[in-house]
């Protein structure tokens, strides 16, 4: 089952030298309700934000 974390802006992938893979939720750094390493797969999450959404920057 795919996890929401895989496509979330808040995800930071951690890979150890032995190729173990951990999914770190960076939202946990500012919101203690979110676990640092959420149990996978995450199928519902109030903090989810799609990584494909690019923020527009104002033209100068
Ligand atoms: S905010 Fe939710 S979906 Fe996004 S990385 Fe954290 S736990 Fe995963």
Image: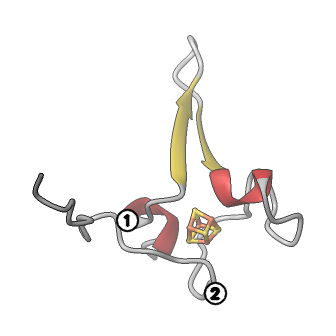
Q: Quadrant of residue 34?
A: bottom right
For label 2, the SS is loop
Position in image of residue 33 (x %, y %): 87, 72
User: Where in the image, quadrant-wise, is ligand 1 located?
Assistant: bottom right
Residue sitting at x 56%, y 32%: 14
Question: Which residue occupies the extreme front position in the image?
Answer: 60
Q: Residues within 10 Å of mark 1 (few under 14, many from 20)?
A: some
Q: Residues within 10 Å of mark 2 (few under 14, many from 20)?
A: few
Q: Nearer the viewer, mark 1 or mark 2?
A: 2
Position in image of residue 10 (x %, y %): 53, 58
Position in image of residue 55 (x %, y %): 27, 65
Q: Which mark is residue 7?
A: 1
The residue at label 2 has a CB less than 8 Å from ligand 1: yes
Residue sitting at x 59%, y 29%: 20
Residues under numbered marks 1 and 2 in contact, where contact means CB atoms less than 8 Å apart = no
Front-most of residues 56 and 38: 56
Residue sitting at x 44%, y 65%: 8
Marks 1 and 2, how far apart at CA? 14 Å
Front-most of residues 54 and 7: 54
Looking at the image, residue 30 lies above or below residue 12 = below
Position in image of residue 40 (x %, y %): 64, 65
The residue at label 1 has a CB less than 8 Å from ligand 1: no
Q: Point out the tag, 1 or 2, that comes first from the N-terminus.
A: 1
Relative to residue 27, is residue 29 drawn left or right?
A: right
Looking at the image, residue 58 lies above or below residue 22 = below
Question: Which residue occupies the extreme top position in the image?
Answer: 17
Residue behind mark 2: 46
Q: Quadrant of residue 18?
A: top right
């Amino acid at each position: 089952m795919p996890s929401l974390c895989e496509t979330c802006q808040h995800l930071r992938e951690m890979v150890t030298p032995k190729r173990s893979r951990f999914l770190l939720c960076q939202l946990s750094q500012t919101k203690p309700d979110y676990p640092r390493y959420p149990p996978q797969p995450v199928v519902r999450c109030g903090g989810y934000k799609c990584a494909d959404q690019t923020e527009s920057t104002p033209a100068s």
